[in-house]
């Protein structure tokens, strides 16, 4: 059973529907015991970084997520769920209290989340974009996947970046470190390519 973490933000039903289509059992939950017992964990996300972190801390799910990421079981962050894994984000800096220019994240993957500053292209980036320079096991170079975001991750360690996309700049579109995987794009909205990525992840939970 794959646990899809419900913290009040995210495409929960879309992720569950995609897994069902692939014949994998999943449950949408905020129960620490269910998350701990799951064979794999997905942290989805749509929305803003600061309120998401506030929700996680207020519910105690921040520590549950950290434990799951370090448990060795397959773990997948999607979109905002990828950004939350980082040390901090520029998004919502007016709400930051202890990191100066960054709102504190979960700190599972060393690095920061930064705002697109391109003047040539519209922000947020909404739509399909191509994956390039892929080294991660879940990704295929040249796949077109669906993005909706105004911020992007900058991992401290280049080896954590599993694939890139280009939008004004070349940026990290996916992360892999041991059992932890994350995508800035939405595999559940990315057609056949996205289903293949979700299937490669879900196969690891067996």
Image (cartoon, rainbow, N blue to C red):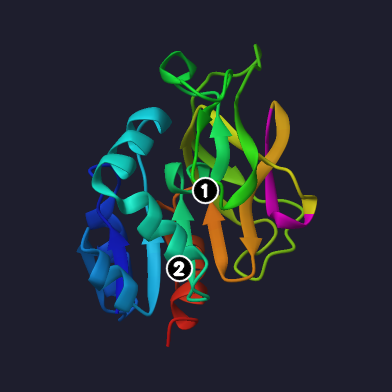
> Which quarter of the rendered picture does the N terminus lie within?
bottom left
Residue 187 visible somewhere in the drawing: no
Is 161 magenta? The answer is yes
Query: Is 41 contained in the magenta span?
Result: no
Relative to residue 57, is residue 125 depicted above or below? Answer: above
The answer to whether residue 172 is left or right of residue 4 is: right
Q: In percent of the image, x 27 and y 42: which residue is there?
A: 9
Q: Which residues are magenta?
A: 159-167
At 64% from the left edge and 17% from the top edge, which residue is drawn? 117
Q: In the image, residue 173 lies at what x, y percent?
A: 62, 47
Nearer to us in this view, 177 or 37: 37
Residue for badge 1:
85
Query: Which mark lies nearer to you, 1 or 2?
Result: 1
Comes first in the chain, label 1 or label 2? 1
Q: Quadrant of residue 166?
A: top right
Q: Is residue 164 left or right of residue 64?
A: right
Across and down, in percent, residue 168 comes to 70, 26
Mark linked to residue 30: none
- The image shows residue 136, relative to residue 165, as above or below, that is below
Q: Position of residue 120 (x, y in %)?
A: 66, 14
The vertical placement of 31 against 90, above or below, is below
- Residue 127: image location, x then y, percent: 48, 37
Q: Secondary structure at mark 1?
A: loop
- Return the residue at label 2: 198
């Amino acid at each position: 059973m794959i646990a899809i973490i419900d913290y009040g933000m995210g495409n929960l039903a879309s992720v569950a529907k995609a897994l069902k289509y692939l014949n994998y059992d999943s449950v949408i939950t905020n129960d620490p015991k269910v998350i701990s017992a799951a064979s794999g964990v997905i942290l989805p996300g749509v929305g803003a970084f600061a309120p998401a972190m506030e929700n996680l801390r207020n519910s105690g799910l921040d520590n549950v997520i950290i434990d799951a990421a370090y448990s060795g079981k397959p773990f997948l962050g999607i979109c905002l769920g990828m950004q939350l894994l980082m040390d901090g984000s520029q998004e919502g800096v007016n709400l930051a209290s202890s990191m100066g220019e960054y709102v504190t994240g979960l700190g599972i993957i060393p690095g920061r989340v930064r705002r697109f500053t391109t003047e040539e292209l519209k922000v947020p980036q909404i739509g399909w974009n191509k994956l390039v320079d892929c080294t991660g096991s879940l990704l295929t170079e040249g796949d077109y996947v669906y993005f909706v975001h105004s911020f992007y991750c900058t991992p401290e360690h280049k080896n954590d970046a599993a694939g890139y996309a280009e939008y004004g700049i070349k940026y990290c579109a996916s992360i892999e470190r041991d059992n932890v995987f994350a995508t800035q794009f939405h595999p559940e909205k990315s057609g056949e390519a996205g289903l293949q990525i979700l299937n490669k992840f879900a196969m690891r939970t067996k």
